[in-house]
């Protein structure tokens, strides 16, 4: 569970069933288990109005857990990028009364929230629950390139190669943590690298 | 200490009867300067000096926020009320010098919304007059559904129709026209915000349906100024000020506290903003809560009261004031 450090660092809750006509779930990997936990608390006909977009990841586990909930629509994606057009289309056609639930890694929650914000949903209206990896999506503040799945501190920008301090400073607009050059004064100074975002 | 209610010295520049119940009042600054800017949904507290007594009532500003040469309010005559609206209708004339507060907005537009869906009932139309003017000026997307008792009591209905045409839909009670609320709320695009102003029954109905149909609370905005209700006189002890005061039939508890020289904070004087929330030290009797600020739990606990609109019946009441 991520601890609160500075105000922009996202904090996540526990999914709970909301009143509404349609329920859109986006989850990756262990995020499926957060949906299963919600199902235990939900009214009987809840998933009859639900649409689940699930990205199982490499292990390909948990898809059967979600299918067993008998959602009205169920979509398995190979990656977030491949699921994004479907997500955008769903949001573009949606009406007030749609409730959004995001569960899984921070990268998945952040990018799905980014699409939802662009569709006009307020971030405070979205249910989130963090499950699984703490790997971060990081923007290099110098070259603006985004590096996915950052697990170390510091981390190397996969675009410009600078060694970056991965800050808790988060941008909802970019769905990324900010990475700032850690040795700008003296590039020969190389601090030890630790794996801290597992 | 009237938080945020710096005063403006104004002169009534025009008084315009709108229909059999509603009259519009125009205010300009006595020094000829422009008035402070405001945003759609803002209200001012108007001081009514009526002989011995002073009433302070909130009214929504209904003019365009783009024009600060004057403020305009519309007052519905309430023959059974405590006399504020009757004072405005009977005694205020062009040229009358009055004092109003700076504008305060407790019902502002959320300008991040993709669309603004507005529901008005009766005199609840006034904040929407300013909000629609503000939105129309910047190409905002809005739709107004306005319910009135009869066409002749549809205050500004003709004007709104003329200005905004199909973006305004009218419903008349005497023709049994009703908003198809569930269908309306279920057919709005994502990113719509809902605004409702009117009688408390209407606000309660709309909020309940919106919540049930999955509108997140942060997308539902409402305003209802509860007018202080007259009631049986009662005595109150103000523990911090060491005073015992009497609240008469036509006076609100807040007005009685002020009349005793104690100056509690206030903003809306209509049970909405929360500024005058007061702790109860002890009581023997029953509260008549009329506010929209305290939770039901607070009301039941008997530990808090909003003196601007709520009253008390019983043997003794001691407030932390």
Image (spheres, coloured by chain):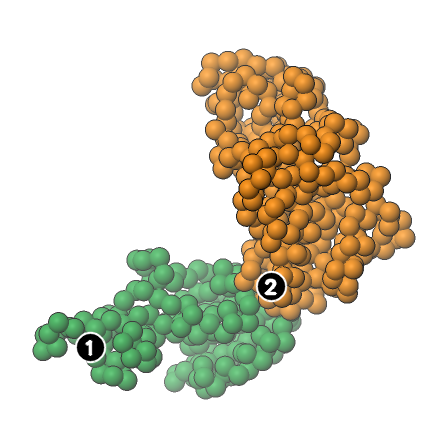
Judged left or right of residue B14, residue B44 is left
Residue A168, relative to residue B155: is it above or below?
A: below
At 36% from the left edge and 61% from the top edge, which residue is drawn? A8
In this rendered view, identify the residue nearer to me: B218 or A141.
A141
In percent of width and height, residue B131 lies at 64, 54
Q: Which quadrant of the figure has residue B170?
A: bottom right
Is residue A177 in view from this perspective?
A: yes
Judged left or right of residue B298, residue B222 is right
Q: Could you tell me which secondary element the residue under label 2 belongs to?
A: loop
In percent of width and height, residue A124 lies at 49, 60
Q: CA distance from mark 1 to mark 2?
A: 46 Å
**Chain in orange?**
B
In this rendered view, identify the residue nearer to me: B170 or B25.
B25
* Residue situated furthest right in the rendering: B175
At 75% from the left edge and 48% from the top edge, which residue is drawn? B121
Q: Chain of mark 2?
A: B
Residue A138, relative to residue B269: is it above or below?
A: below
**Chain in green?**
A
In percent of width and height, residue B226 lies at 67, 36
Q: For mark 1, what is the residue? A: A163
Q: For mark 2, what is the residue? A: B138
In percent of width and height, residue A38 lies at 52, 64
| Residue density around tag 1, few if under 14, some if 14–19, many if 20 or more, within 10 Å | many
| Residue density around tag 2, few if under 14, some if 14–19, many if 20 or more, within 10 Å | few
Number of numbered discs visible in the structure rendering: 2
* Residue situated furthest front in the rendering: B32
Is residue B88 in view from this perspective?
A: no
In this rendered view, identify the residue nearer to me: A56 or A174.
A174
Judged left or right of residue B121, residue B99 is left
At 60% from the left edge and 23% from the top edge, which residue is drawn? B255
Residue A60, relative to residue B140: is it above or below?
A: below
At 74% from the left edge and 41% from the top edge, which residue is drawn? B24
């Amino acid at each position: 569970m991520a601890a609160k450090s500075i105000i922009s660092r996202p904090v996540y809750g526990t999914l709970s069933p909301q009143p509404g006509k349609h329920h859109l779930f986006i989850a990756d990997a262990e995020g499926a288990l957060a949906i299963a936990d919600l199902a235990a608390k939900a009214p009987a006909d809840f998933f009859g109005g639900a649409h689940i977009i699930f990205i199982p990841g490499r292990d390909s586990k948990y898809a059967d857990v979600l299918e067993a909930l008998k959602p009205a629509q169920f979509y398995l994606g190979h990656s977030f990028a491949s699921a994004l057009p479907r997500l955008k289309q769903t949001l573009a056609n949606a009406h007030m009364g749609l409730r959004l639930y995001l569960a899984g890694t921070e990268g998945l929650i952040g990018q799905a929230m980014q699409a939802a914000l662009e569709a006009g949903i307020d971030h405070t209206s979205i249910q989130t629950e963090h499950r699984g990896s703490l790997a971060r999506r990081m923007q290099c503040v110098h070259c603006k390139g985004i590096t996915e799945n950052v697990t170390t501190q510091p981390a190397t920008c996969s675009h410009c190669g600078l060694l970056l301090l991965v800050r808790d400073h988060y941008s909802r607009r970019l769905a990324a943590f900010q990475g700032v050059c850690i040795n700008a004064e003296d590039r020969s100074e190389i601090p030890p690298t630790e794996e801290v975002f597992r | 200490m009237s938080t945020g209610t710096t005063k403006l010295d104004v002169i009534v520049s025009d008084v315009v009867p709108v229909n059999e119940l509603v009259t519009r009042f125009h205010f300009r600054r006595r020094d000829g300067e422009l008035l402070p800017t405001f945003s759609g949904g803002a209200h001012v507290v108007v001081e009514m000096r009526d002989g011995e007594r002073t009433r302070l009532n909130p009214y929504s500003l209904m003019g365009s926020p783009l024009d600060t040469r004057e403020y305009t309010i519309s007052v519905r005559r309430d023959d059974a009320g405590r006399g504020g609206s009757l004072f405005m209708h009977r005694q205020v004339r062009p040229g009358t010098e009055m004092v109003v507060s700076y504008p305060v907005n407790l019902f502002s537009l959320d300008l991040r919304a993709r669309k603004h869906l507005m529901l008005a009932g009766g005199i609840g139309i006034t904040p929407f007059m300013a909000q629609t003017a503000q939105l129309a000026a910047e190409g905002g997307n809005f739709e107004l559904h306005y319910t009135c008792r009869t066409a002749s009591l549809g205050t500004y209905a003709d004007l709104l129709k003329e200005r905004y045409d199909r973006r305004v839909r009218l419903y008349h009670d005497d023709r049994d026209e009703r908003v198809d609320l569930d269908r309306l709320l279920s057919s709005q695009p994502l990113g719509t915000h809902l605004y409702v102003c009117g009688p408390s029954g209407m606000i309660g109905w709309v909020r309940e349906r919106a919540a049930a149909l999955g509108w997140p609370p942060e997308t539902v905005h409402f305003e209802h100024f509860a007018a202080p209700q007259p009631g049986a006189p009662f005595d109150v002890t103000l523990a911090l000020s060491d005073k015992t005061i009497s609240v008469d039939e036509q006076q609100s508890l807040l007005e009685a506290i002020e009349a005793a020289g104690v100056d509690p904070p206030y903003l809306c004087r209509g049970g909405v903003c929360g500024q005058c929330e007061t702790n109860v030290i002890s009581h023997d009797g029953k509260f008549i809560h009329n506010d929209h600020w305290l939770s039901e739990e607070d009301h039941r606990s008997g530990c808090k009261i909003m003196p601007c609109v709520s009253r008390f019946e019983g043997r003794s009441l001691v407030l932390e004031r």
